[in-house]
Image: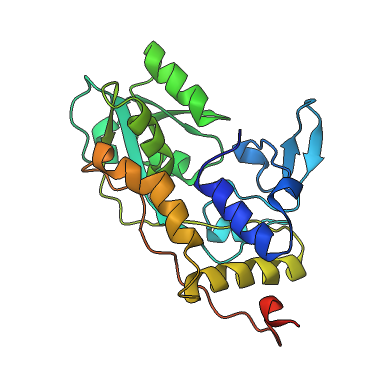
Amino acid sequence: MWRGFDIEIAYLIAEDLGFRRSEIRFLSIESEDRARMQATDSDGKRVGVDMVIASYSITPAREATAGVTFSAPYLYTEQSVVTRNDHADVSTLQDLSGRKVCSLAASTSESAATSAGMLVSSRKKISECFAALDRGDFDAVTTDAAILAGYKARYPTKYKHWDIGLDTTEAWGVNVGENPALLQLVNLALYRSREDPEDNRWEEAFDRNFTVEERINRPAPIAVDQQPAVKEPDVRQWPWERV
């Protein structure tokens, strides 16, 4: 069963585009395939997707990549670190310099960890990093706090979640590929969610997925509890105003 904050954002957007939940098809996608918009179906076949909603941080380098077009951001989070519970305190990335650390392939966290002097190995799935951490293959796992928080919440006595004090904000966006019309519609849905006082779908998704994890993850922050601002799309008529 598919669940999580990204899944609820996908429902939010798709519903505003006129799709029923039963009409949405979710597919697994590896971190490095998000730019190519190539997922894997249940038969193991490569399948192109219409949208990538997969904790994909907006960066200038990614925006310059062919085939990548980001929507407005739908979540602000930051990079953090998880270790086993018996690990010494971690307050900065430099505290792990020279240590073996796991991160997601092609992620922004991977480059920051390497720059801090960590011995970084990448995996296609964050679950693979945690399995290796449990075996003792790594000293820590680093990626976005909104991802790591779920593991700490699920196994509160096994892991420690550390705030490493980075100033960099990770802004997650939807990759719509080379489809400007779809980009406009996605931004329209996000704008409506942000500006309509009667639309609480984003806030409810945040509460269900992150607010419940905050107490267990303290003092490490998870994500900003307000939807990022969205520039008003230039449309003649809102879809929901049509007669």
Q: Which residue corresponds to the image point at 63% horizontal and 60% vertical from the top-left?
A: 13
Residue drawn at x 36%, y 13% is: 136
Query: Residue 23: x and y, percent?
Result: 76, 48
Give the residue at x 29% y 48%: 221
Give 150 or 119, whichever is nearer the viewer: 150
Locate the C terminus by quadrant.
bottom right
Say if residue 185 shows up in the picture.
yes
Of residues 229 and 86, the one nearer the viewer is: 229
Up the image or down, 81 lies above or below 6; here it is above
**Of 118 and 88, which appears nearest the observer?**
88
Quadrant where the N terminus sits is: top right
Considering every residue shown, the one lying at the far left of the view is 89
Whether residue 193 sits left or right of residue 78 in the image: it is right
Task: Between residue 115 and residue 237, name the one nearer to us.
Answer: 237
- The single residue placed furthest to the top in the displayed view is 135
Relative vertical location of residue 66 with respect to residue 127 in this rendering, above or below: below
**Rendered location of residue 133, percent (x, y):** 39, 19
When asked about the image quadrant of residue 187, the answer is: bottom right
Name the residue: 57% across, 80% down: 232
State the count of labels: 0
> Which of the 4 image quadrants contains residue 3?
top right
**In this rendering, would 104 be left or right of 91?**
right
Q: Answer whether residue 98 is visible to the viewer in this image.
A: no
* Residue 96 point in image, percent of width and height: 28, 31
Percent x, y for residue 134?
Answer: 38, 16
Q: How is the image coloured?
A: rainbow
Residue farthest to the front, as pictured: 243
